[in-house]
Each structure stands twice: as structure tokens, then as C-alpha cells.
Image (cartoon, rainbow, N blue to C red):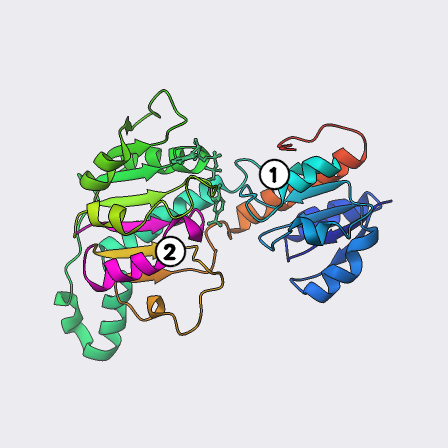
Amino acid sequence: MAKILVTEAIHQAGLQALTQAGHHLVLADRNMDVIRRELPDCDAIIVRIIELPGQLLEQAKALKIISKHGVGVDNIDLDYCKRRGIAVTITPNANAQSVAEHAFTLMAALAKHLIPVSRKYRTAGFSAKNYAPGVELTGKTLGVIGAGNIGSRLIHMCRYGFHMRVLAYDPYLSQAPEGAELVPLDQLLAQADFVSLHCLLNDTTRGMINAQRLSQMKPTAFLINCARGPVVDEAALLHALQSKTIAGAGLDVTDPEPLAPDSPLFQMGNVIVTPHYAPTTLEAAIRVSRIAAENVHSYLSGQQPEGRLV
Ligand SMILES: NC(=O)c1ccc[n+]([C@@H]2O[C@H](COP(=O)([O-])OP(=O)(O)OC[C@H]3O[C@@H](n4cnc5c(N)ncnc54)[C@H](O)[C@@H]3O)[C@@H](O)[C@H]2O)c1
């Protein structure tokens, strides 16, 4: 029997599987006091987005595996884990469809001014129908930055479902993903009506969408970020939105998270913010929870888990 610290709420599916396998679970529910108290003798951690720096992990003397519930591992000190021989696993593809659908939903809602028109209907009545005409997605150009599991699903949806032209920028791909043309970043930014970010966060992508890159976008274009907040320079984005350099933004992730309640982003009619909510669907929650749990159990049983990074 192993002691497994689950830092944040996850679907019951994986928790039940671990309990049935005889493990002892500690559910911290984002409470850092509980996390610090329970760390020293835990064998495994299941983590969502809480930061796990080496300084904190040093206290986890018995730790053998960190199982990421999701795919973005920028919250885990991978170098420290490598040095200590702590395995790190992810749940590849398990929430990709939900995140791609969320990016699409943000695009469509922005294109149709869904939220401002709905609000206006409440206050101004039926005349709200002429308040802000939307645009069609069909025939428009989508630019996808990072065409991995999530980006390639969005490409497929938009190309074959909506007959959009799709441009992709991904320096690690030699061949264009099906349905898209691989282009340089400058071209993508200049031509896209929607720019959707699906790259990982690392030293090369941190702050990639800065003032200069935002100024390359069309004034009618929308930026979608379902990747990680720090990929976008948020001060530059605010300025671009306020000065109408771009038309609007759909942000599932921000920097910092959570977004401050008084952030101007909450007040802007041309911005939709969601609380890192893209993968929060029933289907993805079950899949990710099960796989994150299986990764822990199989590693502690001496097997090689799928999605092992370190
Ligand atoms: N909003 C959410 O809750 C949520 C959920 C899941 C994933 N994510 C984020 O989405 C990211 C992508 O997930 P995925 O499953 O598609 O990962 P993936 O590894 O399949 O794809 C990432 C892609 O980014 C590309 N890339 C790397 N550096 C790049 C750069 N400098 N410019 C452009 N592209 C670059 C890679 O080549 C790869 O194709 C994750 O790293 C994570 O940060 C967010």
C-alpha cells in the first residue's frame, strides 16, 4: 500500500481505482498547509496546476513518482526530479479534444459577439439584435501556433467542419499537419483572423506573443490562448485590446492565475476569460483521472507507465 497525495480535486474514477488497489489517498484540495504536512512520507503525488518547485519536493523524502493530471509540466521542477530519480508522467491526449473544442468555442463566441449581445438583450430588449453584427467562420483564416495533439485537433475541426484556411507555425514539425499549411510565424500573424495558441510553455515560448507580435496581427483578428498564460505578455495584450490593435481575445489561461478580480480583462466586452477550464468536461475528467491514477499504480507496481517523461 502506498501513500498518494492528490494536491487538487480530480474525478472520482481515478481515486476509486487507487483505493480499490489498496492505496491510501490524501486529498489536499489545494490547501498548501495540508500539502506541506503530508509531503514528507508520501510515495506519489497526483498534481494538476499547483507549483511543485524543487525546494518543496526536497521535503518529500519517500517520493517515487509525480503523476501530472494533464500534459503541461511547467509547474513541476523536472530537473530536480531527474536528479533525484523521481519519475514524472503525463496523460497524453486524454483532454486534447476538450481543449480543442474549448478553443473553438471561444473563437465562435467572439466571432458572434455572443456574450455582449446576450447582455444587451437583457438591458435593451430585442433591438440588441442589431447591436453588434458577428462574422462567419467559414472562409476565414485560422493560425495555430503549436500543432501537437490539441492544435492538430483544432486544425481538423476548423478545416473540415468550417472550411477555414488554416496556417500552422510549429518549429519542430517538418511536415504540415493534415488540413494546414506550415508557415513562418510572421506570415501567420499577418494573415490570420483567429490566432490560437497550443504550444507548451518553455523558455522559447514565454512571452512569445509580445507587443511587437500583437502589432503584426490584423485589427479585426482575435487571439485565443488555451495554452499557458505566460506565453502572452499580458500587459502588451491589454494595451493591444485597449488601443484596438486587435479585435478581442479568448483566454482560458492568464498570467498570473487566478486572474485578479479587478483585472480590466474581466470588464472588456471583447474579451472572454475562463478559469483554466478548457479540459473540464465530464469525458476528459474521467479519462485524465483514470490515466493519472493508472500511471501511479503501474509505476509503483514495477511497470513502465504510458506517458512517462522523466
Ligand atoms: N487550458 C488548459 O487547461 C490546457 C489543457 C491541456 C494542455 N494545455 C496546454 O497546451 C499545451 C499543448 O498541449 P498538447 O497536448 O497539444 O501538447 P503537444 O506536446 O502534443 O503539442 C505541443 C506542440 O507545441 C510545439 N512547440 C514547441 N515549441 C514551440 C514554439 N516555440 N512555437 C510553436 N510551437 C512550439 C511542439 O512542437 C508541439 O507540436 C500544453 O503544453 C499545455 O501547456 C492547456
Give residue 265's position: percent from left, percent from top: 34, 66
How far across and down, in percent of the image, does residue 215 sit?
A: 21, 49
The amino acid beneath tag 1 is Ile
Residue at the top extreme? Answer: 175
The structure residue drawn at horizontal position 74% and vertical position 53%, both measured from the top left corner, is 5
Q: Which residue is mark 1?
A: 90
Q: Quadrant of the C terminus?
A: top right
Q: Residue 229: within the magenta?
A: yes
Name the spot of residue 156 as percent of width and height, x first. 34, 33
Residue ranking furthest to the bottom: 123
Label 2 residue SS: strand
Q: Report the residue at 67% width, 62% height from top.
A: 29
Identify residue for label 2: 251
Q: Residues within 10 Å of mark 2 (few under 14, many from 20)?
A: many
Mark 1 residue element:
loop
Instruction: Name which residue lies at 36% across and 58% down.
Output: 234
Q: In the rendered structure, does residue 292 fall within the stretch colored magenta?
A: no
Q: Nearer the viewer, residue 158 or 44?
A: 44
Give the vertical position of 89 relative to 268 (above or below): above
How many angstroms separate mark 1 from mark 2 (CA)?
A: 23 Å
Could you tell whether 300 is left or right of 196 in the image? Answer: right
Residue at x-position 35% and y-position 68%: 266
Q: Is residue 202 visible?
A: yes
Number of marks in picture: 2
Q: Quadrant of residue 294?
A: top right
The range drawn in magenta is 220-245
Residue type pointed to by label 2: Leu
Residue 246 in picture, x, y percent from top left: 21, 54
